[in-house]
Image (cartoon, helix red, strand yellow):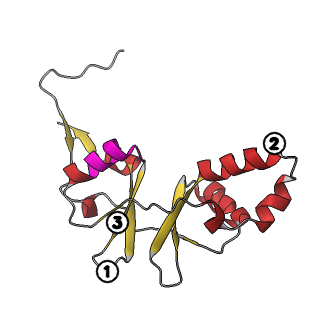
Amino acid sequence: MPHTTPTHARLVLRAQVARDVMSSDLVSLEANAKLSDALSLFVDRGFGAAPVIDVAGRAIGVLAKVDILTHQHSSLAQSVAAPEVLDRTQVSDLMSPVVYKVQPETPIWEVLEQFRSLKVHHLFVEDRHGVLLGVISTIDILERIVLE
């Protein structure tokens, strides 16, 4: 039986601000962590990206799976053994130094606009002192859309 949607139904995002959709179960990577440890974290926990923090706990970059894949492809093309490369490469060697952030009070429409304009799938939530509080993924947004 085909699924039909009433013509008067509409999709509604049940959130007002970033805090409403963020996940506070934030896992970060230290800048001097080994790439092999980051890869294990991504695979074991199913993450696509993680913030990279300095010794004070502030975000200084982001490492994504694609960064590791790009690095591995480049290394293999140069005939370097993959395990050796992972063992000597640090997270800070590959991370993007750009961290896209919002504050907990950022209106949800601004969060959506940043996802669209920046073409990213993760935004990190930090307080006004730069302390990381959580992360918002595009999946977090989709999970809060309901049919009314």
Quadrant of image for the N terminus:
top left
**Helix, strand, or loop for circle 3?**
strand
Answer left or right for 106 relative to 126.
Answer: left
Q: What residue is at 43 percent from the left and 62 percent from the top?
A: 99
- Residue beneath disc 1: 129
Give the image location of residue 42, x and y in percent: 61, 57
On screen, residue 68 versus residue 58, left or right, reads right
What secondary structure is the magenta-colored segment mainly? helix
Lower position in the chain sequence, tag 2 or tag 3 = 2
Residue annotated with mark 2: 77
Q: Nearer the viewer, residue 147 or 119?
A: 119
Rendering coords of residue 94 (x, y %): 63, 60
Q: Amino acid at mark 2?
A: Ala
Q: Nearer the viewer, residue 8 or 19?
A: 19
Residue 121 x, y percent position in the rendering: 43, 48
Toward the bottom, the furthest residue is: 56
Residue at far top of view: 1
Q: Is residue 118 magenta?
A: yes
SS at mark 2?
helix
Residue 143 appears in view: no
Judge from the rendering whether residue 57 lies leftward or rightward of residue 85; answer left or right.
Answer: left
17 horizontally vs 53: left or right = left
* CB atoms of marks 1 and 3 within 8 Å: no
Label 1 vs label 3: CA separation? 11 Å
Dot 2 or dot 1: first in sequence order is 2
Dot 1 amino acid type:
His
Magenta stretch containing residue 58, yes or no?
no
Distance between the alpha carbons at the discs numbered 2 and 1: 43 Å
Query: What residue range appears in magenta?
Result: 111-120
| Residue at which label 3 appears | 125
Q: Secondary structure at mark 1?
A: loop
